[in-house]
Image (cartoon, coloured by chain):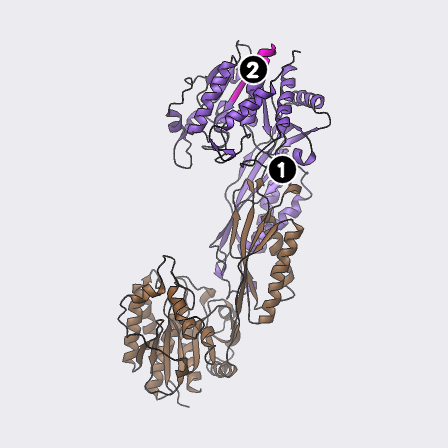
Chain colours: A purple, B brown
């Protein structure tokens, strides 16, 4: 095994440079196809070229840096676009990490490694757009019809000159495996004082959109026993859900009522209906299924008990994804060597491009801590020593594959 | 006692005519100072004149019809404006009832009776505007500065020509007592199969505006035990409130969580804060006070237990109002004579102009049923036989006073 000696100063300087594209305050504003994002991609392409990597762009706009030669090789990357007002590390860290490991491996005479920045991970058009298309989870024609909040299609956004090479096909068969390093975006590592997370799986997501319909009434003249109040239904529903989930979940399972819309939403009116969402995540598909039954069964029971109408109108499911066991063990071995006792195996509660890529090749992920668990915010941050350590673990694992 | 013989056909015809002003679908759109409301007031003034009543308008725009002579007399009335999209009876019924009893009493040689239509009861500027100013609960200058949703002040609205007599002072001392008949706007009489409600008091209203502040987070990466979720706080709060109120309330007490605003209200985000209102109504001020303690105390406990921030930012209180006992008994006697076994004593859960007038003279109210309890809606309706019966009870009581 030839060690890949990364250059921490170069890694951090490139991360700081990428941050300057689309910067606003202490965060970045760099949605897909924005001027700032296009400029950052041109700069990324230059850095790839300087490193001796060949720049290629596939038809949906994923940006690749390929090592010389044709044999299959490891691919490392993430995305360089940001939330509308996101932090400096979400995505960007994984791209610069891939760039650093790929070029350090060329310099060190290590294995051939490619880097990728996926298109539109953060959802200007839909989330994970670039990796969905590349991994064959969404036809390109369908992606091109997607629109942003302003009604612009992906196809229209693609037409503007971007100063990058013309699009070429990039078969997934060119790559033997995929690694993605990312900030955790949660508080687990930070609150435990740990420095590395070896991801075992990316959780599945289920969500249901519910409406309880009661009878809109005057809040002064309608006695309590004659009310059919959907907000009281919501309260009983969430209470019941919490209680029933208790015997079903693990400490890693999460569920959230994040959206509530009361109609007509006036303090003097017994509401007529309430729309709300329940979203639940777990790495075990069977557990997700049992939770679905509880979500629906509890809603039916509450609606019947309280004489409310019930609509279930927006079920959505994203399957959980397991990381490749051999890659998990490779990453775990490197983590234990470089951060003994300071790492853990964990699920990813957030979705990542790696989930799509797993349909085409073995995949695994690493996490570094997010200070106070904060992400999708200008406050997002990670200690520079942890940023370097993460890439060292990645490089050591890549060297041993 | 000279009986006041009302003319049912004339009462119903006038109610039907008033409905045509601002008619839309099967309801009315007749906010204060709208063209439709001004036209209805000119027509009302004509009907008063035809009936032998002297038309007078006070400085805030309350429209009076006065019987000949100067001695103090009974006043009967309500309001002829409507909710933005209201029913045909809310307010209008009480005004036409007053008109009918006043003119029938003149025809029958009964007691002198005046009628009033109060200005802006339904809240284009604020609720009960006209009776608040007339009863000295709000200075005229303050009322004139009130604005509607479009920024128009009451003073500006008042300046348009309305075809009514110039404003004159109308001392409350000209009247000996006030009666208001109104649709119940709730389901109590209708669901019990009763025809008349003798109102004993108008409930007091308290409301509190609360905010629970937690920590906005990613709904996938934040473990349940590290969350500070204000929507979960709301659920526990309402559950606690319901439970604690149980030992405190009567069947007539009501409480409502009618307004809920979650921030940022996205299904994938653990909410950062939730604003909501609690409103509670009861005829007993001491009970309202004890409920206030529960509303606040429970909020403090939940906030502490769940590590949430708490803001109480919008307490409001309207005192309960008792009807005059002698008038209650007079109305009850007439109800028992004309609708034996088909009436009840009850509180008014809604506010009415009568609450303001009670600061100046003895006051009482009658209710007739609202079909299915519906009001503030085009579907608002009452059987014509009940509309007539209500005015007959009112006339019989007025004759005996």
Left or right relative to B170: residue A325: right
Vertical relation: B345 (above or below) B160: below
Disc 1 designates what residue? A372
Identify the residue at horizontal 47%, vertical 65% (top origin). Answer: B373
Chain letter of mark 2 equals A
Residue A243 visible from this viewpoint: yes
The quadrant where residue B149 appears: bottom left
> Does the segment drawn in magenta span residue B124?
no
**Residue designated by label 2:** A103
| Residue at horizontal 31 percent and vertical 69 percent from the top | B40
Residue A135 visible in the current orientation: no
Viewer-closest of B4 and B262: B262
Q: Is mark 1 on a helix, strand or loop?
A: helix
Viewer-proximal residue among B181 and A346: A346
Q: Where is residue A58 in the image (x, y as percent from the top left)?
A: 45, 20
Q: Position of residue B70 (x, y in %)?
A: 35, 87
Q: Quadrant of residue B183?
A: bottom left
Residue at image x 34%, y 83%?
B104
Horizontal relation, residue A313 to residue A193: left or right: left
Q: Which residue is drawn at 63% across and 43% down?
A: B227
Outermost residue on the right side: it is A341
Q: Do labels 2 and 1 share a chain?
A: yes
Residue A36, given in percent of the width and then of the height, sits at 44, 28
Taking depth in this image into account, of A343 and A365 the one nearest to the observer is A343
Mark 2 Cα shell of 10 Å, populated few (<14), some (14-19), many (≥20): many
Query: Helix, strand, or loop for circle 2?
Result: helix
In this view, A318 is above or below B67: above
Position of the N terminus of chain A, as image quadrant, is top right
Query: Relative to residue A400, is residue B173 drawn left or right?
Result: left
Q: Which span is picked out in magenta?
A: A103-116
Q: Residues within 10 Å of mark 1 (few under 14, many from 20)?
A: some
Q: What is the quadrant of the C terminus of chain A in the image?
A: top right
């Amino acid at each position: 095994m030839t060690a890949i000696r990364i250059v921490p100063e170069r890694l951090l300087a490139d991360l700081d440079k990428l941050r300057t594209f689309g910067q606003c305050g202490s965060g970045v504003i760099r949605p897909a196809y924005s001027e700032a994002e296009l400029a950052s991609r041109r700069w990324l392409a230059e850095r790839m070229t300087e490193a001796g990597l060949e720049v290629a762009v596939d038809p949906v706009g994923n940006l690749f840096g390929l090592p010389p030669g044709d044999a299959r090789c490891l691919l490392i990357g993430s995305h360089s676009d940001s939330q509308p007002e996101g932090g400096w590390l979400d995505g960007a860290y994984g791209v610069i990490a891939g760039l650093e490991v790929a070029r350090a491996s060329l310099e060190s005479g290590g294995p051939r490694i490619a880097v990728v920045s996926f298109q539109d991970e953060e959802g200007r058009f839909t989330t994970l757009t670039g990796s969905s298309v590349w991994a064959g989870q969404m036809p390109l024609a369908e992606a091109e019809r997607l629109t942003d909040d302003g009604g612009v299609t992906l196809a229209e956004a693609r037409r503007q000159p971007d100063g990058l090479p013309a699009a070429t096909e990039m078969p997934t068969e060119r790559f033997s495996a995929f690694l993605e390093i990312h900030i955790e975006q949660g508080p687990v590592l930070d609150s435990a004082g740990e420095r590395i997370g070896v991801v075992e799986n990316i959780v599945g997501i289920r969500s249901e959109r519910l409406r309880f319909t009661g009878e809109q009434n005057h809040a002064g003249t309608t006695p309590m026993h004659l009310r059919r109040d959907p907000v009281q239904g919501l309260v009983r529903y969430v209470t019941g859900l919490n209680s029933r989930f208790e015997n079903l979940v693990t400490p890693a399972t999460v569920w959230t009522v994040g959206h509530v819309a009361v109609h007509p939403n006036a303090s003097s009116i017994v509401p007529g209906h309430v729309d709300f969402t329940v979203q639940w995540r777990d790495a075990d598909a069977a557990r997700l299924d049992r939770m679905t039954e509880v979500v629906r069964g509890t809603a039916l029971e509450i609606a019947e008990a309280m004489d409310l109408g019930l609509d279930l109108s927006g079920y959505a499911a994203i399957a959980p994804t397991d990381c490749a066991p051999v890659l998990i063990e490779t990453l775990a071995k490197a983590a234990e060597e470089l951060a003994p006792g300071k790492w853990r195996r964990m699920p990813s509660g957030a979705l990542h491009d790696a989930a799509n890529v797993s349909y085409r090749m073995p995949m695994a992920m690493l996490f570094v801590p997010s200070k106070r668990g904060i992400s999708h915010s200008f406050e997002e941050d990670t200690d520079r020593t942890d940023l370097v350590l993460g890439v060292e673990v990645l490089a050591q694992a890549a060297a041993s594959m």
